[in-house]
Image (cartoon, rainbow, N blue to C red):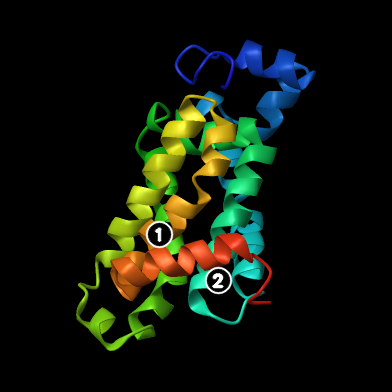
Amino acid sequence: MRAKGYAEATVNDIVAMARVAKPVFYQHFTDKQDAFLEAQQHPTQHILDTCAEAYFSAKQWPERIWRMLNALITLIVENPAISHLRLVECYAAGPTAIRRAEEITRSFTIFLQEGYHHRPEAQSLPRLSPQAITGAIFEIIRHHVAQRDYTALAAHLPRLAYIATAPYTGAEDAIRLVEEIRQHPNRGA
């Protein structure tokens, strides 16, 4: 999918790249879309587990967000083919693939819920705020994955942490917190 894109890739391309016979492919999948959906779904639990482990490795919520986003970016950079499939090609693979991509984006809203308790003013934020925030973060990530610009993506960690925390902490505090965490990333362990 990364080489040709979903629309242009064929089952012949898939079996050639996987070095399996076509009958073996059809023993496991009904068609190209079925294989795509399985490849899209397969790493989901690992991604969430890795991000949750990173999140809970810090004591304070802003550090938790930083670590979770760092883990997510690391997974994306270390797995460019899967990242491209999950974040870019899903939009060419049809409604089920798009829905699955949106589900994983929504699953990351759980990491933002603690922000509502960060300061009293955060409690008045709309309950859809986490969806808007994760949507913005994943759109930035998706853009860099589509451009195959993984170096720039890694450099966006402070910006992504700011986007995630600012609505809850306030803009000024978010800038201060992100800068402190950036300078001392292991402080909150």
Name the kind of residue labelled 1 in the image: Tyr
- Place of residue 76 in the rendered image (x, y in percent of width and height, measured from the top left): 60, 42
Residue 92 location in percent, x, y? 39, 26
Q: Position of residue 181 (x, y in %)?
A: 56, 66
Q: Residue at x 70, y 25 (%)?
A: 25
Q: Earlier in the sequence, mark 1 or mark 2?
A: 2
Cα separation, mark 1 vs mark 2, equals 11 Å
Residue hosting label 1: 162
SS at badge 2:
helix
Residue pointed to by mark 2: 63
Query: For this view, does 116 lie left or right of residue 25?
Result: left
**Image quadrant where residue 98 sits:** top left
Determine whether 3 is above or below 100 in the image: above
Assess whether mark 2 and mark 1 are in contact (beta carbons under 8 angstroms).
no
126 with respect to 81 (left or right): left
Neighbour class for label 1 at 10 Å: few (<14), some, many (≥20)?
Answer: many
Whether 138 is drawn above or below 187: the answer is above
Q: Would residue 95 be seen by someone viewing this image from the given angle?
A: yes
